Amino acid sequence: MSIVEKMLTEMFVRLLNIEISPRVMEKLVPVIEGVTEKIHGTLDLDTVQGQNTFRALICSMVAHGWGLGMHPDNNPETNNDGKALEVKVCKDILVPMETLKSIRYVKKDQYGRVKKALFEPDQNARIWSQIDGMLEQLAKEKWQDD
């Protein structure tokens, strides 16, 4: 068993609590290997170009997965134990901490998925914005050249 097969098996068991069939494994391994070859030693995530390249690779992974039938309309409903399938993913690794701190309201649909999220700047940014507005108003009223 290759390292990619081990990783895929572990990810599916840990995140989805399901075992993937050898037929699906045969299709997934070349996709993972292909992405690994493309980013090997050439991707610098500190640059915008590197970040965009990484995003493009991830999008291609999602597209390949979708093509393999790995999408919401084609997932098993239960895990190996017969319980309803629950994906455990820590979403805070996908969003900067400043963005998470600025969430003020989340509206979910009937399935618990986020339908709408409202963000606000942090308290300091809002206060500075109000102070700047007051100073601008005072400048117009008191220091107007006639």
Image (cartoon, rainbow, N blue to C red):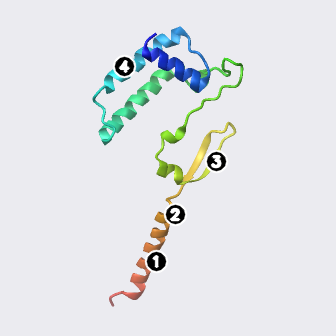
Q: Amino acid at mark 2?
A: Gln
- In the image, 79: left or right of 22? right
- The residue that label 3 is drawn on is 107
Residue at 62% across / 39% down in the picture?
A: 113
Residue at 60% across / 24% down in the picture?
A: 16
Query: Which of disc 1 and disc 2 is earlier in sequence?
Result: 2
* Cα distance between the residues tagged 3 and 2: 22 Å
| Residue that protrudes farthest toward the right in the picture | 82
* Cα distance between the residues tagged 4 and 1: 57 Å
* Cα distance between the residues tagged 4 and 3: 38 Å
Q: Is residue 49 above or below residue 99?
A: above
Tell me where residue 122 appears, x and y as whole percent.
50, 60
Q: Are marks 4 and 1 in contact (CB under 8 Å)?
A: no
- Visible in this render: residue 68? no
- The residue that label 4 is drawn on is 34
Q: Is residue 60 above or below residue 131?
A: above
Mark 1 is surrounded, within 10 Å at the Cα level, by few (under 14), some (14 to 19) or many (20 or more) other residues, namely few
- The residue that label 2 is drawn on is 123
Q: Nearer the viewer, residue 60 or 99?
A: 99
Mark 3 is surrounded, within 10 Å at the Cα level, by few (under 14), some (14 to 19) or many (20 or more) other residues, namely few
